[in-house]
Image (cartoon, rainbow, N blue to C red):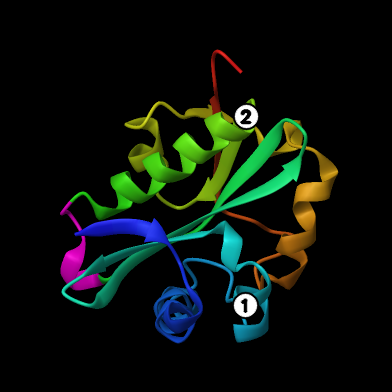
Amino acid sequence: MLIRKANIADIKAIHKLINEFARKGEMIPRSLNDLYENIRDIYACEDGGEIKGVCALHILWEDLAEIRSLSVRSDSQGTGIGRKLVKACIGEARKLGIKKIFALTYHPDFFRKLGFADIDKSELPQKIWGECLRCPKFPECDEAAVILRLRGN
């Protein structure tokens, strides 16, 4: 199992994986164009030549980034892929000097196990809501907000 930055050849598999979860209402759908434009944000888990999971670290401001589009194939869930993908994003955020990482999620317990804490969505800057405008649940968001404050940055 290899956690690495995504490449162009991965995008169609990543698109399919993310949008499977989006069809279930578990995340915002992503277009191919969006994925190509933001490829530098995306980490992929490759195993046996197949993409088993993805996660993106999207920088929003000098001190704030978001974990986005965390998706692990259903047949690979519970194997540590999600944890490894998020840790890769946290590592990159540390290298960049980011002070806070947040996520909007239906699985806050997963993030709490990685050191994230609950936060009220109203405490997040207004600019994070740009993505939310594409969500069919907006403005009645039912996701939990979690945040990780990085030390030493």
Relative depth, front residue between 33 and 117: 33
Residue drawn at point x = 57 percent, y = 54 percent = 142
- Measured from the top left, where is residue 51 in percent x and y? 30, 73
Query: Residue 73, percent across and down?
Result: 27, 71
Disc 2, SS = strand
At a point 41% along the width and 80% down the height, the residue shown is 20
Residue at image mark 2: 100
Q: Say whether residue 124 is left or right of residue 104.
A: right
Which image quarter is the C terminus in?
Answer: top right
Residue 139 is marked as: none
Give the residue at mark 1.
36
Q: Is residue 114 magenta?
A: no
Q: Position of residue 59 (x, y in %)?
A: 69, 46
Quarter holding residue 28: bottom right
Seen at 44% across and 77% down, the residue is 14
Type of amino acid under label 2: Lys
Which segment is the magenta one? 74-79
Snapshot quadrant of residue 102: top right
State the image quarter where residue 111 is shown.
top left
**Cα gap from disc 1 to disc 2, whole angstroms:** 25 Å
